[in-house]
Image (cartoon, helix red, strand yellow):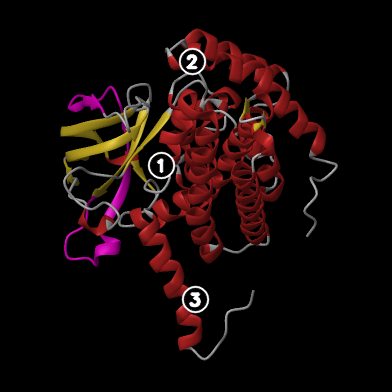
Amino acid sequence: MSFEVPESVRPLREAVHAFMTERVEPAEDALHAGDEALLRDLQREAKAAGLWALGHPKELGGGGLPFLDYVYVNEVQGRSEFGQLALGTFTLQDSLMLDRYAAPAQRERFLEPLVRGDIYPSFAMTEPGLSSSDPTQLTTSATLEDGHWVIRGRKWFTTLADRAAYTTVMCRTETGASPYRSFSMILVPTDTPGYQIIRETPVLGLNGGHCEVVYDEVRVPEENLLGPRGQGFVIAQERLGPGRIFHCMRWLGQAQRAFDLMCARLHDREAFGGSLATKQLLQQHVFDSLQEIQAARLLTLNAAHAIDAGGQARVEIGVIKVAGARMLHNVIDRAIQVHGAEGLTGDTPLDRMYRHARAGRIYDGPDEVHITRTAQRVLDVYAKGGTWSF
């Protein structure tokens, strides 16, 4: 494989970069304040420019980019936390999940408006009060009563539940089955009686639409089941696998932005007889960040290449999920250090970026789980008499 941005992708990547730096990034303050009309304007502009839903399959109305090509675009889109919403890619995981498992009526009600950007999705798996990194502990249940699923339980970190048209809820539906065959996915419109948003849970002081929701005797028709009964874990893994590498792609854009800010700052400021760029200790920050970004980028491209070749790439994704989150945290941390006291304020985007980066080591599976699972997969190869091929 080549590490150059393919010529076929370069114009699209440059167009996305221009849209991000000229339209989205300057609008961040207003978007943080909740300017929904501005977000809708940006979405209309993205559609008019042919930049909408680039990673979605063409048959769903998206851009149909192959997985590897999407890395080159997604790393640019990731410069801002609003890139996904402005460019219509926030729905990609849910769209792929519905495309594979949704019945015709579900596709018409949820999938088609999802890709158009007419509605938002949300996904409910994590629960308060237990270690959700072991999802066999989940307690939210659904029982079939008179042709309806009746859901009882509590979820949190259901992102954008306060805006979403529906939530895909993972809940226990089977008794007497193995733990990994006991759960199913059910589509729940958010206006269903008993669906109660208790609060938006701040993450390191930031409100990002992560909601805690109580399911108080929520009743939905039996046909709202997504995929086969007892296949919740299979569907969740298929959804989360690509989602983890999507995070890693966007983290590259965040790291690039922080790196740019750091290097510009080193040239702009003088102290102790010269610019900060002449100070060896600060040059170390540049070197370490350059090395980590490039290493994470190559790992991400390698994982995307493996997926494009038809593999599940579980080892590659496990490695890059951990390495990418650490890289992002380290690069932003150094950029803040170079900015001094200003880096701790809201005068640069670094303070928000730093807090989001720290959360990356927990969501979609904490580092510890990815490390142990990845190491075990490699060790299993040796247990069978093989060796791991790099």
**Around disc 1, counting alpha carbons within 10 Å, would you say few (fewer than 14), some (14 to 19), or many (20 or more)?**
some
Name the amino acid type tagged 2: Leu
Which quadrant of the structure image shows residue 178?
bottom left
In the image, which residues are magenta? 172-200
Identity of the residue drawn at 30% across and 51% down: 184
Which quadrant of the structure image shows residue 313?
bottom right
Which quadrant of the structure image shows residue 150?
top left
**Label at residue 358:** 1
Spot the residue most to the front: 273
Q: Is residue 266 magenta?
A: no
Q: Pinpoint residue 230: horizontal percent, then vertical percent.
A: 30, 57
Name the amino acid type tagged 1: Arg
**Label at residue 378:** 3
**Around disc 3, counting alpha carbons within 10 Å, would you say few (fewer than 14), some (14 to 19), or many (20 or more)?**
some
**Label at residue 31:** 2
The correct choice, above or below, for 210 with respect to 86 in the image is: below
Q: Pinpoint residue 130: horizontal percent, then vertical percent.
A: 18, 50
- Foreground residue, 235 or 282? 282
**Around disc 2, counting alpha carbons within 10 Å, would you say few (fewer than 14), some (14 to 19), or many (20 or more)?**
some
- Foreground residue, 371 or 150? 371
Number of marks = 3
Spot the residue most to the bottom: 385
Q: Pinpoint residue 74: horizontal percent, then vertical percent.
A: 63, 38
Quarter of the picture containing the C terminus is bottom right
Q: Is residue 62 visible?
A: no
Q: Nearer the viewer, mark 1 or mark 2?
A: 1
CA distance for labels 1 and 2: 22 Å
